[in-house]
Image (tube, grey):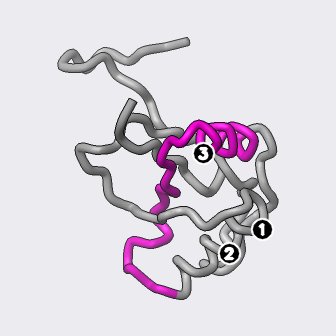
Amino acid sequence: MSGWIGVDLDGTLAHYGDWKGAHHIGPPVELMVKRVKSWLAEGREVKIFTARVWDNNPETVATIQAWCVEHIGQSLPVTCCKDFGMIELWDDRCVQVAQNTGIPITA
């Protein structure tokens, strides 16, 4: 399977409570960290998908990448943009809809 998997940072990969600034990232959500490490071990491409980098601030990107090195063991690409290569998005705010229908998919 080609393409990349987007993983939201706040509330999905890292615990999130209240906003404490762009350079504060909560502790890891261990289940998601384990999942990301598994994908990487399989050779899959994973990107951090977060609104924190909407302004392309290199310090914010560096903070997120350092967090990834500490908790995942490697730096990951960071983006706030979807493209046609994204095959999945893991996010605490998403609602999946059936393609071309507008009908939400519920578990």
Which quadrant of the rendered structure holds the N terminus?
top left
Instruction: Write the start and end of the magenta stretch as one range.
Output: 32-58
Label 2: which secondary element: helix
Which quadrant of the rendered structure holds the C terminus?
top right
The residue under the point 42% across, 15% down is: 105
Point out residue 85 in the picture as x, y percentages from the top left corner: 29, 44
**Marks 1 and 2 close (CB-CB < 8 Å):** yes
Point out residue 49 in the picture as x, y percentages from the top left corner: 47, 55
Query: On residue 40, which mark appears?
Result: 3
Q: Which residue is mark 1?
A: 70
Near-viewer residue (75 or 106): 75
Point out residue 51 in the picture as x, y percentages from the top left corner: 45, 63
**Relative to residue 37, is residue 61 drawn left or right?**
left
Q: Amino acid at mark 1?
A: Glu
Q: Earlier in the sequence, mark 3 or mark 1?
A: 3
Which mark is in front, 3 or 1?
3
Q: Which residue is mark 2?
A: 66
